[in-house]
Image (spheres, grey):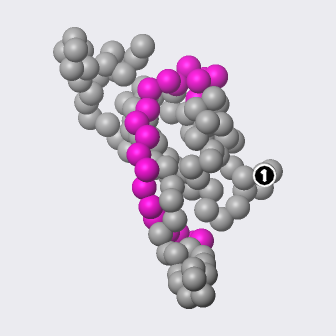
Amino acid sequence: MKMIVAIIRPEKLEAVQRALNERDVYLMTVTDVRGCGRQRGFTEVYRGTEFQVRLLPKLKLEIGVNDAFVEATIEAIVHAARSGDTGQIGDGKIFVLAMDDCVRIRTGERGGQAIGP
């Protein structure tokens, strides 16, 4: 089992969900986050005063999957979250973490059975 954590642009969420659903991945947690990477923010003018916006709005997706779904999940996110054909700085990152256990609270199922449908 793996925990896939993806940081994406907010406007790409629907495309990523569609791509994941096509690969039978439906379960995820989505969190509004702010962060910076190579983009390093941007400069904005408000009421004549210039200021630097360093932390940009992003979405954090957390998706627990069985090992058989790891590559399909990564491919779906990469293709749906990428801007244009070659991508742009700020498209995001994907982290794949080992997951020791998972428990479905309702039934008490553990491991891969708790993740599955």
**Magenta highlight on residue 24:** yes
Which span is picked out in magenta?
A: 20-40
Q: Residue furthest front?
A: 47
Question: For residue 109, what is the image quadrant?
Answer: top left
The residue that appears at 35% across and 41% down in the rendered structure is: 98
Quadrant assignment for the N terminus: top left
Question: For residue 29, what is the image quadrant?
Answer: top left
Quadrant assignment for the C terminus: top left
The residue that appears at 43% across and 32% down in the rendered structure is: 28
From the top left corner, tell me how far across and down residue 9 is, in percent.
Answer: 58, 52
Residue 56 seen from this side: yes
For mark 1, what is the residue?
A: 84
Kind of residue sitting beneath label 1 = Gly
Q: Secondary structure at mark 1?
A: loop
**Magenta highlight on residue 14:** no
Please give left or right for residue 41 compared with residue 81 in the image.
Answer: left
- In the rendered view, tell whether residue 6 sits above or below residue 40: above
The residue that appears at 33% across and 15% down in the rendered structure is: 113
The residue that appears at 63% across and 45% down in the rendered structure is: 12
